[in-house]
Amino acid sequence: MDAELTSLETRLATLLAEYKGLHLENRELTTRVATLQAENKRLGEKVAVATERVEALLKRLPVEDEK
């Protein structure tokens, strides 16, 4: 009976250590995802501005008649 309790106690300690490690990793990944989403949004806005500027420049180019 003591051996079973010791084994269970060891397994429980291992499980708790795994849980704590995974919990910490999850928090770090959640933070990283939020950071990357914010950066992605910022870069998307920059691309949109650049696209608008390029389109405006293209409209100013003279158009040649096709014959």
Image: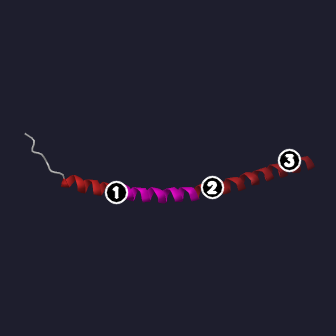
Question: Which stretch did the figure color magenta?
Answer: 31-49
Residue at image location 29% in from the left, 57% down from the top = 53
Helix, strand or loop for the magenta stretch, by majority: helix
Of 44 and 21, which appears nearest the observer? Answer: 44
User: What residue is shown with label 3?
Assistant: 7
User: What residue is shown with label 1?
Assistant: 48
User: What residue is shown with label 2?
Assistant: 26
Residue 60 falls left or right of residue 52 = left
Numbered disc in front, either 3 or 1: 1
- Magenta-span inclusion, residue 64: no
Quote the CA–CA distance across marks 2 and 1.
32 Å
Which quadrant is the C terminus positioned in?
Answer: top left
Kind of residue sitting beneath label 3 = Ser
Q: Position of residue 66 (x, y in %)?
A: 10, 41
Residue at image location 28% in from the left, 53% down from the top = 54
Q: Position of residue 62 (x, y in %)?
A: 15, 51
Kind of residue sitting beneath label 2 = Asn
Within 10 angstroms of label 3, few (less than 14), some, or many (20 or more) residues?
few
Which residue is the extreme one toward the left?
Answer: 67
Of 29 and 53, which appears nearest the observer? Answer: 53
Q: Element type at marker 2?
A: helix
Q: Are marks 2 and 3 in contact (CB under 8 Å)?
A: no
Q: Element type at marker 3?
A: helix
Lower sequence index among marks 2 and 1? 2
Residue 63 falls left or right of residue 39 = left
